[in-house]
Amino acid sequence: MRIGLLLGTFNPVHLSHLLVAERLQKHARLDEVWLVLTPRNPFKQGETLVSDAHRFAMLQLAVAGRSGLAASDVELGMPQPNYTVDTLELLATRHPEHQFALLMGEDNLAGFSRWRSPERILELAELVVYPRPDSGLDPESSWLQHPRVRQVDDALMARSSTSVRQSVAEGSETLDDLPAAVAAYIRDHDLYR
């Protein structure tokens, strides 16, 4: 099977995450997309996160009933800090029958040279890159010429988890950017206030 991996802290997961996952599943001809909960992004050490348990529960609610999408907690049991290359190595060992595609925004590709073992990542997975506003990606980036990197123009991630958290903190009653079950979970557990 061809499996897409959308990694993130999902703090919280929102509709743009799901839209990107579904569109990339179609455009990259993926059998499934696994939304992989990252305990902490090594590049965002100062970020305030709700617990892994809350974020994974919201991720499970968000993908429930969405064909081809699954929530994965594979990174939760790994030593921290965890790096994408470590996750891919583990998944390749656990699932040698699968081919993996790492789904990432242009903002991540712009800084890909700073990632741990980027060449090894490209041996383990192809990259499927989607647009992000103000990504900072140089259109002449050598990564865009790599045979294992593919750009998809259709799946813009228009919203960020930061802006969703800000709306919740400001007391917004309309959380239109969230799946209904996730919005209810946030209210029920008084998160992001």
Image: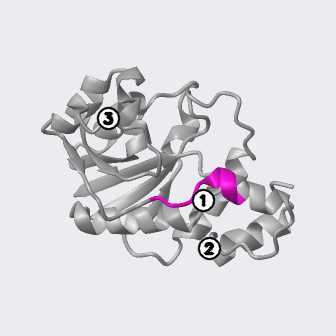
Earlier in the chain: of badge 3 and badge 2, it is 3
In this view, the residue farthest toward the left is: 147
* Residue at the disc numbered 3: 138
Task: Give the Cα separation between the discs numbered 3 and 1.
Answer: 28 Å
* Residue at the disc numbered 1: 13
Q: Amino acid at mark 2?
A: Pro
**Mark 3 surroundings within 10 Å by alpha-carbon count, few (fewer than 14), some (14 through 19), many (20 or more):** few
Earlier in the chain: of badge 1 and badge 2, it is 1
Judge depth for marks 3 and 1 and give the one in front. 3
Residue 128 percent across, percent down from the top left: 28, 49
Earlier in the chain: of badge 3 and badge 1, it is 1
* Residue at the disc numbered 2: 179
Residue at 44 percent across and 43 percent down: it is: 135
Q: Amino acid at mark 1?
A: Val
Residue 168 percent across, percent down from the top left: 79, 62
Q: Amino acid at mark 3?
A: Asp
